[in-house]
Image (tube, grey):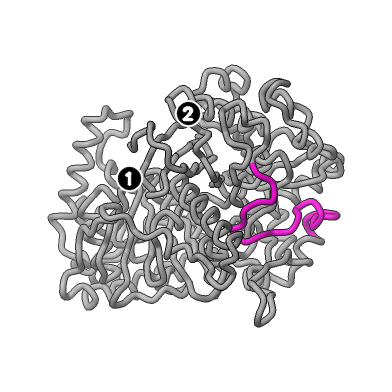
Amino acid sequence: MADLESKSDLFLGLDFSTQRAKAIILDGNRTHVAASSVTFGEEPSLVAKYPQCSPSGYEEDEQSGQVTSPTLMWVESLDILFSRLVSGGVDLGRVVAISVSGQQHGSVYWKTGAEKVLNALDSKKGMLHEQLQGAFAVQDSPIWKDTSTGKQCKELEVYTQGPRRLAEVTGSRAYHRFTGNQIAKISQTQPENYEQCERISLVSSFVCCLLTGAYAPIDYSDGSGMNLLDIRPCGGPNEPDKRVWMEAALEYCGKDLAEKLGTPVPSHTVLPKPISPYFSRYGFRPTCSIVAATGDNPSSLAALYIREGDVGISLGSSDTVFVWLPEAKPGLFGHVFVNPVDTGAYMGLLCYSNGDMTRKKVRDSTQNLQRLSEEEEEQRWQAFTHCLQSTPPANNGNVGVYFFEEEIVPHAKCTVRLNAAGEKVDSFADQATEVRALIEGQIMAKRIHSEQLGYKCGPGTRVLATGGGSKNPEILKVMANVFNTDVYIFSESESAAVGAAYRALHGYERAKALAAGDTDTDVSYHSLISEIPGTLSKVCSPDGDAAALYGQLMRRYEEIEDMYAM
């Protein structure tokens, strides 16, 4: 951590994820100054009020697929977070800019008249959640885990001339979790609440509403995860890129929806209003700038130093792939968002439900599955790693697809194994072959799908790995061989919050340059946020014959996917 006694300007990144609210503070050199967090389902004061959300941070109805979080729980956590930073000795008066990362696809519904309440927030009138008690038309916000909108997804695709057309315009075909479908469900099943709503925020822009005491716009990048935003630029030759809402999607999803959403803005926008006077209780200066918020996935891309030619792979409970794309080529799988740090570029996103839990199931397939101690967990992962070490790249021609959970890309649920002769088998001869088939299949899928989105593997490309699975050197070696390029690991575990802090710095410096009359030079993100030495570490390179080894195996893997995709 940097010296808290220094007087340099500070930049605050907030991340409101599914289970936690996190804060990371950096100085102008991007050195960490302080950090704090609130875990929704474990914080005593929040658990007492919202026991239905303990320990996960959300409430789930397994029968309907509906998953929500109490909006006021998020509101209260912001006060707790700032109180902890102050108690930890942080001078929040040195913070000159704040930006926010929010879990994508969650939505907040402000009741008519709520902006007047936001405008009047007063540190002497009680805490935020007390002053905003009646500000929401819908008390429990749908979040990204919600799968209850199947009807709305089908109807939206029909209304917008089919899934391919919807993807071409908004970057994705209709998905359960996407906000447009959540809005459509509320407008259809809770018409009175929808009618009472004057503004709809994403989780990211909702936090900015709290910070500024006014309705904050949705940014282009997080807006790309709604099935509502036309991601194609519509500015003229000498005009800046701009985006608008897709009219047909708005018509289906809800009456007067354009007014309820407001006008979207570039992700680097400094909002017109600085921080609300309410936050003077924590020592914030009244001029502290608020930079438009974005989603947690775009914010992670901002943190990972991803540039054109890179692919970021996060191996966690679910796996995620980020790809920097110079142009948009959306299709019937995956997602294309407006790039959060360059509005002229795009971000490809692939999500896989079969991540770490699937790796654990294969790891434990011949063993007792009861709860394990940390030592037992470590021993089993060591055995898993040994399986990879004891088998050759390309697995002697054995290939497998392990979709224990219903997969997103492709949409399928199956377990398929082919031996070296191309014959379908129920199991492989040994656990080591099984483990390598799983890992190679997961990594080959990521390369195949990334290339379908427009990623081009070749000289100068890099794989940037993060998440729990990136701690396994043998998995990273498979990654290097399958992608036939160098693999780097990212040392920062809280990438979404770090990305928010970086974006706060970028938005602030860009606005400062424009205010100084430097209109000819647009401060680019990568000119300002250069890679910090030691943040990315090269961990492995491909074997010389990797490309030849995996060429044929990837074609066989792709054939299996094509055969079993729904």
Q: Which residues are magenta?
A: 252-274
Kindly state the secondary structure of the residue where label 2 is placed: helix
Q: Earlier in the sequence, mark 1 or mark 2?
A: 2
Left or right: 283 in relation to 156 = left
Q: Which quadrant holds the C terminus?
A: bottom right
User: Which residue occupies the foreground of this view, 177 or 384?
Assistant: 177
Q: Is residue 526 left or right of residue 469?
A: right
Mark 1–mark 2 Cα distance, whole angstroms, equals 27 Å
Badge 2 crowding class, 10 Å Cα cut-off, few under 14, some 14 to 19, many 20 or more, is many
Q: Compared with residue 242, is residue 301 higher up or lower down, i.e. above or below? A: above
Q: Quadrant of residue 559?
A: bottom left
Q: Which image quarter: residue 317?
A: top left
Relative placement, left or right, of 383 versus 53 is left
Is residue 215 shown to the viewer in this render?
yes
Circle 1/circle 2 CB separation < 8 Å: no
**Residue 20 image point, x, y percent:** 50, 34
SS for dot 1 = helix
Is any part of residue 565 visible from this angle? Answer: no
How busy is the neighbourhood of tag 1: few (under 14 within 10 Å), some, or many (20 plus)?
few
Q: Residue at x 35, y 48 (%)?
A: 467
Q: Residue furthest left?
A: 390
- Going 24% across and 49% down the picture, which residue do you hit? 472
Q: Of residues 233 and 442, which is closer to you in this image?
A: 233
Q: Amino acid at mark 1?
A: Gly
The residue wearing badge 2 is 85
Depth order, front residue of 386/480: 480
Residue topped by disc 1: 468
Residue at (57, 27) in percent of width and height: 282
The spot of residue 61 in percent (x, y) is 62, 35
Residue 254 in the magenta stretch? The answer is yes
From what the image shows, is residue 192 above or below residue 221?
A: above
Residue type marked 2: Leu
